[in-house]
Image (cartoon, rainbow, N blue to C red):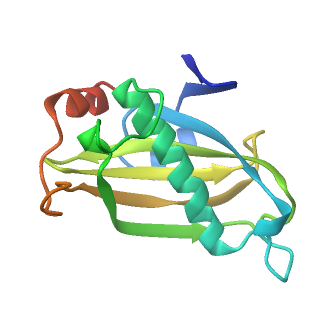
Amino acid sequence: MQFQISDVTYSLNQVSLYQAQRSNIMPNTFTYPSEVYFDELDGLGFLHHTRYLLHLERAQQKFFEQLLGVPDFNADRDEDIYVVVHGLDARFRVPLSKPGMIVVDYQIVKIRSGGVTMDFTIRAPEGETVYCTGTRNLCKLSAETHRPVPWTDAFRAAMEAF
């Protein structure tokens, strides 16, 4: 399945056997192409570890937009976008040492009342080189109270269907 936002096409692919063996994941992967720029490299010439998080955020935004069926990120309109990162576990596998395209893959592992656990892989577009793998836990908050609240029925259904 493919979808387009602006002039970029994103695709949903079946997870690889390697990814399926890593954890108990649902059978779909959200794939987001992201560009690494020269100014993201550190003094050693590698993508700085904090920059991986930026690419994860960009991918999550597009993933949530797709699940919601909306063209942009608007927390005033879409309450399920109001989330915080509750936990993050990242394993850096191979240093990324040049600007260019990377791919961020997300798989939903577990959906809770107001939270979701997603596995991620940051890799080269051809799929052979894996730069970083991990797990990310999100918690939905109320915009008014900043306390955890459940997902809307529609968003939870979209995550479950994914």
Mark yes or no: residue 20 visible. no
Residue 130 x, y percent position in the rendering:
69, 54
Residue placed most toward the observer, 26 or 7: 7
* Residue at 72%, 42% in the rendered image: 127
* Quarter of the C terminus within the rendering: top left
Residue 136 x, y percent position in the rendering:
40, 59
Q: Residue furthest bottom?
A: 43
Q: Quadrant of residue 36?
A: bottom right
152, above or below 123, in the image: above
* Quarter of the N terminus within the rendering: top right
Residue 19 x, y percent position in the rendering:
52, 45
47, above or below 20, in the image: below
Q: Could you tell me how many numbered marks the image carries?
A: 0
* Residue at 25%, 32% in the rendered image: 155
* Residue at 67%, 66% in the rendered image: 93
Mark yes or no: residue 94 visible. yes
* 77 left or right, relative to 119: left
Q: Residue furthest top?
A: 1
Residue 71 x, y percent position in the rendering:
47, 27
* 83 left or right, relative to 27: left
* 27 left or right, relative to 98: left
Q: Quadrant of residue 126?
A: top right
Residue placed most toward the observer, 49 or 7: 7
* Residue at 58%, 18% in the rendered image: 2
Residue placed most toward the observer, 24 or 10: 10
